[in-house]
Image: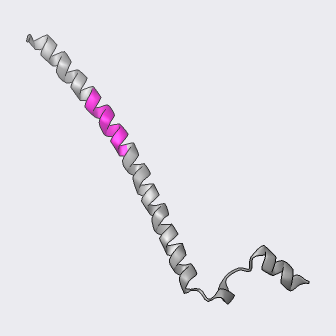
């Protein structure tokens, strides 16, 4: 393989690798955001389990029943 062909091959591989890195970084950001949402969901469930029923906001049906 002559040096010019080899150089072109390496440059193509570098460009392809940079593209892959960029895509992986984007997916990593999305995965981290998803993880944060899941953690927030777990925290919310934990708070709901700890809160006595009187501390929770009434449902629309309960609010209508007490307004009558």
Q: Is residue 49 above or below residue 3?
A: below
Q: Residue at x 35, y 44 (%)?
A: 25
Q: Quadrant of residue 17?
A: top left
Across and down, in percent, residue 3 comes to: 9, 13
Q: Is residue 63 above or below residue 54?
A: above
User: Left or right: 55 with respect to 4?
Assistant: right
Across and down, in percent, residue 16 comes to: 28, 28
Q: Residue at x 49, y 74 (%)?
A: 43
* Quarter occupied by the N terminus: top left
User: Left or right: 7 with respect to 31?
Assistant: left
| Numbered label tally | 0
Display colour scheme: one colour
User: Which one is in front, 48 or 26?
Assistant: 48
Across and down, in percent, residue 12 comes to: 24, 22
Q: Quadrant of residue 59?
A: bottom right
Across and down, in percent, residue 39 comes to: 45, 67
Q: Is residue 12 above or below residue 66?
A: above
User: Which one is in front, 29 or 54?
Assistant: 54
Q: Main secondary structure of the magenta part?
A: helix
Q: Residue at x 22, y 22 (%)?
A: 11
User: Which one is in front, 54 or 8?
Assistant: 54
Q: Is residue 68 above or below residue 12?
A: below
- Write the start and end of the magenta stretch as one range: 16-25
* Quarter occupied by the C terminus: bottom right
39 inside magenta stretch: no
């Amino acid at each position: 393989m002559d040096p010019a062909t080899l150089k072109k091959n390496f440059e193509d591989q570098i460009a392809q690798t940079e593209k892959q890195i960029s895509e992986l970084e984007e997916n990593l950001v999305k995965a981290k955001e998803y993880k944060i949402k899941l953690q927030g969901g777990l925290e919310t469930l934990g708070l709901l389990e700890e809160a006595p029923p009187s501390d929770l906001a009434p449902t629309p049906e309960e609010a209508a029943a007490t307004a009558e």
